[in-house]
Amino acid sequence: MADTATTEPLIASTDARGFPNEFDGREEEMEGEDEVDERNMVAPGKFIWILTFCAGVSGLLFGYDTGVISSTLISINSDLSSRPLTTLDKSLITSCTSFFALLASPLTGLLADAFGRKTVILTADILFILGAIWQAYTSSVWGMILGRSIVGAAVGSASFVVPLYISELAPSPFRGRLVVVSSLFITGGQVVAYVVGWMFSETAHGWRWMVGLGALPAAIQCVMMWWMPETPRWLVRAGKKETAKKVLGQVYAKCQGVDERRLVKSVLRNVEKEILEEEEISGESGIGRDGGKAGWSAKVDKVASNFNQLVKVGGNRRALIIACMLQAAQQLCGFNSLMYFSATIFSLVGFRSPTLTSLSIATTNFLFTLVAFHYIDRIGRRRILLLSIPIMIIGLLLCAIAFNFLHLPTEESNTTTGAEQNATMFWPILILLSMILYVAGYAVGMGNVPWQQSELFPLSVRSLGSALATATNWGSNTVVGLTFLPMMDLFTPMGTFAVYAAVCAAAQWAVWRIYPETVGLGLEDVSGLLKD
């Protein structure tokens, strides 16, 4: 092939769709010339930090919603439907958010592929605002459930798409830490929620301020994200290679340790190569054209094709099993029962300021998420789980033992009299310390590693696979929200925490058996670990 330009083109030759011709004579030569190892990067550039921060605000919204319900439940009193909340009311108000997040996350996967990751984040912000305002003004239990359901759809969308958005933009050596930034925002949001709950706990109808303030960060993020770009990997699939190249140029600008220009070309070529390989496997064609012209029937066929590819291709199926296993374990270990009901638990065992006591749980979660941020790309995903899950088990077992020696008030009695029924505060304090130990172990590993799910899937099924894994998370979350209070009544607190410890033990075994290490690998390389 003759050179016809004075400057070297991005792609030596292309097929009819604009993708590189893998069989061109210069391809091997150019790959050798432009291939750059991202692992040589010393630090990410400022632009990727700005992107991560803007997207991470969704995590703050997620965390705020998780944490604020704990304070809200003990502050509502008879403000809704002119009666005190029953156990069923509390379970429904708590679990409806998870249930609608479960419904939203698979749909979000389709929307993220069709319209882009950024569009889904903006849509979630609008839902956050509507849900927060509705909750603040409602006067009935069912109105509260509706508002919480709207927020649930937003949470389900954001919890899926934000880690995907960050992972598709992040350089591979820093991908783990940058995705953990989203978890930092989640835990930070929980801390803010408990502080707000404490501030308004003595205010008449203060719970309305607690839930209504959730609209503020959503509005701020909506403005910030309007100016942020789409991910280059989605842009390439949509046929917008030049835009993708510009975004990559911004992401890798001023990155230390590598040649920026060559790195952009290398990453772009790897993405295009992966798309071509996936097309050959799935038998698709026409990627990069305007899918809207083909109509919705073509989109449905595309989803069906992706689903078949996800469950029938061995490597994809393994990725789905691992991602769903990790997300289920993250919820079934019982962590969000503490987030939803910590104030109720601490009131039950006799602490005079249950909301303020709950703040220690949220603060521990935030501080040890910082530990995960520092070590997840150094220790590795698999190893950090194998080291942290035993800490969770110890904390849960100590909690179960302490509850066995604690006399709890009955449902008919005043729940603030727990301290009066116990001669000492030793057991309540041991419960608090055990929960802190459990949360520390959770924050280091299980709270963060499952959200690295996007790196397990190849690009063609990344949205769908991540959406199904996120749906597993929210399905499990719904189970925990619905069953925690009934389990406390049926199995006693000791039995409930022992069940959560058993789930953690099963998760430890599963991680040891089937979860490979992915630290430091590019998104296009990780799937190779799971192939037949």
Image: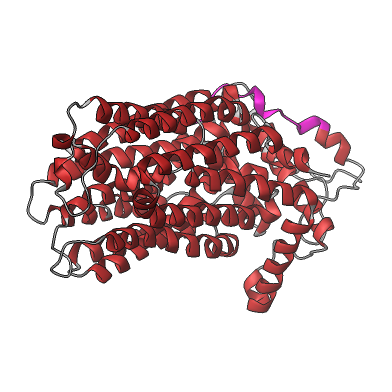
Looking at the image, which is closer to me, 450 or 396? Answer: 396
Horizontal and vertical percent for residue 425?
A: 20, 27
Horizontal and vertical percent for residue 482?
A: 39, 57
Question: Dividing the picture into quarters, in which one does residue 467 lie?
Answer: bottom right
- Residue depicted at x 21% and y 61%: 85
Question: Dividing the picture into quarters, in which one does residue 54 lie?
Answer: top left
Horizontal and vertical percent for residue 341?
A: 30, 47
Compared with residue 296, is residue 276 higher up or lower down, i.e. above or below? Answer: above
Residue 123 in view: no
Q: Which span of residues is magenta-colored?
A: 32-45
In the picture, which quadrant includes the C terminus?
top right
Compared with residue 439, is residue 95 higher up or lower down, i.e. above or below? Answer: below
Specify the color scheme: secondary structure
Report whether 138 appears left or right of 439: left
Does 231 appear in magenta? Answer: no
Report whether 283 appears left or right of 146: right
Question: Dividing the picture into quarters, in which one does residue 151 lie?
Answer: bottom left
Horizontal and vertical percent for residue 243?
A: 59, 51
Compared with residue 521, is residue 333 higher up or lower down, i.e. above or below? Answer: below
Looking at the image, which is closer to me, 467 or 219? Answer: 467
Compared with residue 93, is residue 66 higher up or lower down, i.e. above or below? Answer: above
- Residue depicted at x 56% and y 35%: 505
Tally the numbered discs: 0
Residue 445 in view: yes
- Residue depicted at x 27% and y 53%: 214
- Residue depicted at x 63% and y 77%: 296
Report whether 341 appears left or right of 265: left
Report whether 116 appears left or right of 298: left
